[in-house]
Amino acid sequence: MTEFAEFMERALYDPEHGFYESGRAGRRGGHFITSPEIGPLFGAVIGWMLDRRWEELGCPDPFTVIDAGAGPGTLARTVATAEPDCTPALRWINVERSTAGRSAHTVGESTPGMPHGPITGVILANELLDNLPLRLFDSDGDEVGDRPASSETRLTPRQDQACAWLAHALSILSQGTVVVIDYMSTTEEMASRPWPEWLRTYRGHERGDDPWTAPGTQDITCEVALDQLSAVCQPTRVTDQAAWLKAHGINKLVAEGSAAWQAGAARGDLAALAGRSRAIEAEALLDPDGLGGFTVAEWEVPATN
Ligand SMILES: C[S@@+](CC[C@H](N)C(=O)[O-])C[C@H]1O[C@@H](n2cnc3c(N)ncnc32)[C@H](O)[C@@H]1O
């Protein structure tokens, strides 16, 4: 039997037919667009957060930031546009396994795998862990493979690859922070809900079929079990995206945008328009039923000496 993880690996990442290699992936669509793809505001908040971390670390140079699962590298572009104070020291590394994604990178370094380290800085993973192949078990403890499970069956996810990713990220960080942003849940909670609620597929801008149908034509994504990540290492902080963005200056950036809009509205210049769009972007990023309800888990790695 092929394990579900192996099936998911091929369906998403097969060099020829995988969803993320075939050019079909594009951007997660509709309601499920990712935060960096909403517009430049998310990158501006990340830039603000990076400056605080950089200062807390004593302004190291280089200050390394890894965007793990960078997709087309939009976050790197929007952070660069925001011109944070740490820019002169910033070494930005986009880690993206798909060739299609890497070919779109225009800012920072671009590599298919996590660097070895050690690094001082920040490792970000926005909507990466939900895309890593996982194992599935039914209530008898039997492993689910490449044959469809009935939607009535209660399944339990085991996210070994997500856990291994976190362990590796922590191991290469000599000082700094790992920030994981994703839709999260717990193993127990998922085991008690019908699996189609937490193991979802997307094709284009719509929900897709069950994960076993037409592999390579749809995204497969699973809520991330925070308890499994916590067993690797207890996070330093856990909050939701709305609270996290507010703690990192989103309201101030929106207010600045509104002021720019009011000052430049009569002229209709680009800065004024960008200012106005911040309010609309903030609404999507803070929506408690959407991106604002995502979980942000952070692991601080202090200096060892
Ligand atoms: C849902 S996308 C998120 C992209 C981006 N972070 C964003 O928020 O828009 C997940 C990305 O992770 C990439 N990916 C999956 N597994 C990976 C791995 N082990 N290493 C690097 N990238 C990976 C996929 O190819 C895909 O581009």
Image: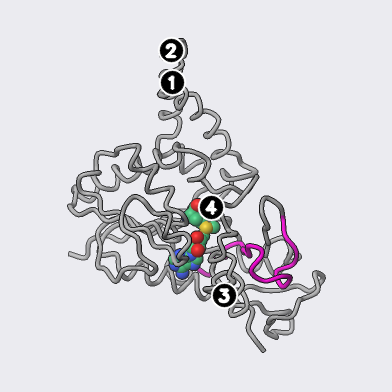
Residue at label 2? 267
In which quadrant will I find the C terminus? bottom left
**Disc 4, SS:** strand
Residue at image coords 31%, 61%: 301
Residue at label 3? 9
Residue at label 4? 295
Nearest to N terminus: mark 4 or mark 3: 3
Circle 4/circle 2 CB separation < 8 Å: no
The foreground one among 92 and 286 is 92
Residue at image coords 18%, 48%: 58
Residue at image coords 38%, 69%: 113
Residue at image coords 53%, 66%: 21
Nearest to N terminus: mark 3 or mark 1: 3
In which quadrant will I find the N terminus? bottom right
Horizontally, residue 64 falls left or right of residue 262, namely left
* Inter-mark Cα distance, 4 to 2: 40 Å
Q: Amino acid at mark 1?
A: Ala
Q: Position of residue 51 (x, y in %)?
A: 29, 42
